[in-house]
Image: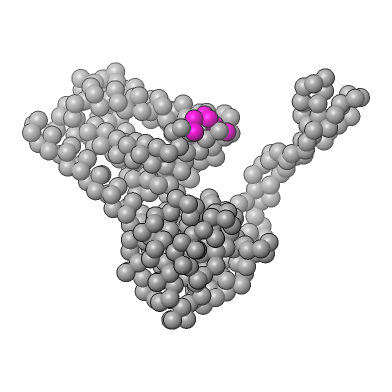
Amino acid sequence: MKNSITQFSRIFVGILFIISGLIKLNDPVGFSYKLAEYFGEPVFNMPFFVPFSLAIALFLVILEVVLGFMLLIGYKSKFTIWSLLLLIVMFTFLTFYSAYFDVVKDCGCFGDALKLTPWQSFTKDIILLFFILILFLNKKLIKPLFNNTIQNILVFISFALCVFMAYWVLNHLPLKDFRPYKVGNNIQKGMRIPDNAPKSVVEMIFIYKVNGVEKEYSEKDLMKIPTGATFVDRKDKVIVEGYVPPIHDFAMEKDGSDYKEEFLDEPKLLLFVSYDLAIADKEGLSKLEKLKETAASKGYKVIGMTASLPEQIAKTKKEYGYTFDFYFCDAIALKTIERANPSIVVLEKGTIKQKVHYNDIQDLKL
């Protein structure tokens, strides 16, 4: 009985770590954005780690996959189980922190393939911790499936394949796109809210300074505010989250106006997407003007989209001789559209027909 439970735990934990790791390895840039959230000021306030988010993301996801594979074949079981235990303790702490303090809405455990609430993520980690503890207490029952030479070769191959996959998706695009802006999706439809969609329940909170201390009062507590208290601020507290459409922060703004309705009605629209022009790949940026001329000659409307400041836009246009305009969109939305900086997106009346990395411009079908 003990052996059966241990072997089930071995298979369950190993497969789950491999699946979770591969989903994030498919889109390590997206996972790095999630890590940057944790490192940011609202959560752990460790901004010195933010520049290393991608490197840390790659290390963690490759480690997940390789450890899961090592567990399945019984490779160095003591080291593997100890590593899994330390990893799941760290993940459990992060998901609990996210859930309890409500600071990160989605831990990114399964990337964009499966969205979990913080408490769902924490529950998942508690279940994994339970099964890993079973493995920890029964390490001697985890036997290798092959001899040492074959085991070493298999682990090396698994590591090499992970590194190759990471290299490929970073220099091209994710192998599988789980985002709301994937090819075939229509942006207008993604922004619509169904008539019968649940509405958010919001409570107004009033902040007053009482004897030098800021205190919060709900609408029903306004009569309890002491005389002499000083009003500081008002905020909205979401009691129940309503329906949020898959695409909810998309814009094409310029000079105070939003042109998305006009542009999303274009039969031929080519977008150059760069959430931050200051850190965009220079080689990629240098290819855009020539592509713009080619697309324009074939009847395409060509624009850029960025969250950069006007000063940076002007500097980039001058440096690369761009003859197209840039329109503003929130950086988070642009990062969701595509991971490459810059990237190229082809739209037909709001429907995404093609997306390519700046390394794959030759694959565009205009």
Can residue 175 be seen here? The reply is no
Q: Identify the residue shown where x is 19% and y is 30%.
A: 74
Query: Which quadrant of the structure image shows residue 353?
Result: bottom left
Q: Looking at the image, is 344 positioned above or below residue 94?
A: below
Residue 277, position in %: x, y? 48, 55
Quarter containing the C terminus? bottom left
Instruction: Indicate whether residue 45 is drawn in magenta.
Output: yes
Which residue sits at x=44%, y=50%?
279
Q: What segment carries the magenta color? A: 42-47
Residue 170 horizontal/vertical position (percent) = 33, 51
Residue lying at 20% horizontally and 20% vertically, measured from the top left: 140
Q: Position of residue 195 (x, y in %)?
A: 67, 60
Q: Residue furthest right?
A: 227
> Residue 187's quadrant in the figure?
bottom right
Magenta span has 182? no
Q: Nearer the viewer, residue 198 or 58?
A: 58
Q: Does residue 84 lie above or below 312 as drawn?
A: above
Residue 131 left/right relative to 123 = left
Is residue 321 something one can see in this rendering?
yes
Q: Is residue 353 above or below residue 239?
A: below
Q: Residue at x 54, y 40 (%)?
A: 105
